[in-house]
Image (tube, grey):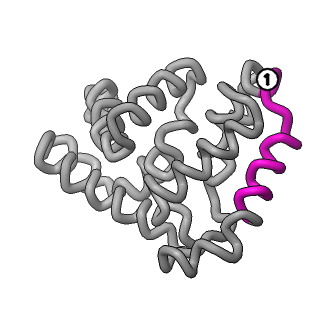
Amino acid sequence: MATDRKFTDVVEEDSLIRVLCAFAWSTQATTAQDTGVSFTYVQGMNVLAAPFLYTMSEMEAFYSYSNLIKHCCPLYVQPTLQGVHCGIKLLEECLCKIDGELYDSLKSKNLTAKVYAFPSVLTLCACTPPLEQAMQLWDFLLAWGIHLNIICIIAQLHMIRDELMSHA
């Protein structure tokens, strides 16, 4: 998103930094005691905060981002990115069942989901341009559940299946 002109016209880097710092401070003391999960900054947190800042005020973005991280995907932002790795594994299992031929073709070229889908799983597809479509996808994911991101990534793979099969 940082390279998208529409995004950078709306969201200042300082706003993103403030939201991420406020989240870090707000979770520093209480989270580990309350849930057994603690939060530190990990790769991708900025991309998960960005869609909120694009669509709402800084304070609303902080609240929404905090709720997403704390309640929907706390394991995605652990130092080991445990939730992301589980998502990658689930994606591979689903792709194998849904389209075994594509799965086998990618696997034969040593293209695992960790290689081709890691950023999309990590960021709930917020890193996938164009921005307006990513925002529509987030509307869907926030309404129906972020777990559907895995199915959406498989749908994206299906849309480019012929190209993947001809190159893989």
Q: Residue at x 47, y 43 (%)?
A: 124
Q: Considering depth in this image, is 168 or 138 the residue closer to the camera?
A: 138
Q: From which residue to which does the magenta span run?
A: 8-24
Residue at which label 1 appears: 10
Residue at 54% of width from left, 50% of height from top? 67
Magenta stretch encompasses residue 15: yes
Q: Is residue 142 above or below residue 103?
A: above
Tell me residue 76's x, y (percent).
49, 61
Quadrant holding the C terminus = top left
Q: Residue at x 74, y 19 (%)?
A: 6
Q: Residue at x 43, y 60 (%)?
A: 84
Disc 1 is placed on an element classified as helix
Does 93 sit left or right of 118 as displayed?
Answer: left
Q: Is residue 49 visible?
A: yes
Q: Is residue 121 left or right of residue 164?
A: right
Q: Main secondary structure of the magenta part?
A: helix
